[in-house]
Amino acid sequence: MGNQTTVTEFILLGLSSGPKVKLFLFGLISVIYVITLTGNVIILVLIWLDSRLHTPMYFFLRHLSIVDICYTSSTVPQMLANLLNSRKTISFAGCSVQIYLFLALGITECVLLAVMAYDRFVAICYPLSYTLIMNRRVCVGLTAVSWTCGFLLAMIHAVQTLQMPFCGPNEINHFYCDILALLKLVCADTHLNEIIVFVIGVLILLCPFVLILISYVRILGAILRIHSVEGRRKAFSTCASHLTVVALFYGSAMFMYMRPGSTRSADQDKMVSLFYSIITPMFNPMIYSLRNKDVKGALVKVLQNIKGT
């Protein structure tokens, strides 16, 4: 404990040190960020404008788009600034806010994806009772639970980590304040923190994922009992988009937070984080719009109205 210092700022080492690579990454990530914001805003506007999209499925999709906008915005602006600046610093307060928001929004998305799986389960397995079961009060309650779980559990993570003593050097080998990278700078026993990361990882990643799998096993059984080929196709198509998003997000997040520490590599962690924190939110609106007739129809209707005026 003799080398403990009072840390007022951290240095984010980022993705690369080469100037040409930095410029390339700045352009690439800027384009991805603009696409992410544009795609999710379009989803929000379409759901707001088209009354046909005022259903539980699109109510949850609207919240997913809000989460994705905030999720990427919690890290990307800082990352872009650091790619252009030689001094890649972030204040202790800024790091605290970033780590809290990133965890809160990530956990919210995990729970929200499980809620969306439950919605599809009710829609396909209990179609006649769907509107009764998934009424507005239930939908609001489920989204409130998703947001509350995210911000409360993230607070446990953030407070437990940020109250630890930090030692020099204050360099975080990441492009944002990642909790696992931050724990490497602590000059105290981090065993309890690592247990908390694992336990919350199981609760927020594995438990919802198991619930999603159970929902889709039940959904598959219901689909196979449908005699109409067109009915089966329609049922499969309503679930395909959600399953794709679940596979992308949960697959990368589980690989990041639920594998043994002995197998970790800083560069590998950064690449995986880049995928689920930046790439996946860009794909979500594309997946839901390109594979969804209702969303495409709403977009065509809005474009025709704009053209007509």
Image: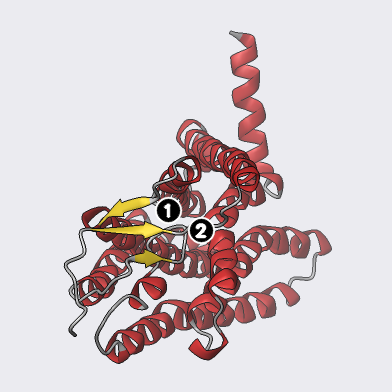
Which badge, 2 or 1, comes first in the chain's sequence? 1
Local SS, label 1: helix
Q: Nearer the viewer, residue 276 or 151?
A: 276
Hey, which quadrant is residue 167 in on the image?
bottom left
Local SS, label 2: helix
Q: Nearer the viewer, residue 74 or 223?
A: 74
- Give the residue drawn at x 19%, y 85%: 1
Q: Position of residue 30 (x, y in %)?
A: 56, 39
- Give the residue drawn at x 41%, y 77%: 204
**How far, Cα to Cα, is label 2 from label 1?**
7 Å
- Residue to which mark 2 is pinned: 277
- Give the residue drawn at x 43%, y 64%: 112
Q: Is residue 92 left or right of residue 111?
A: left
Residue type, mark 2 in image? Ser
- Asked whether the beta carbons under mark 2 and mark 1 sit within 8 Å of each other, the answer is yes
Hey, which quadrant is residue 229 in on the image?
bottom right
Q: Position of residue 193 (x, y in %)?
A: 30, 84
- Residue to which mark 1 is pinned: 71
Residue type, mark 1 in image? Tyr
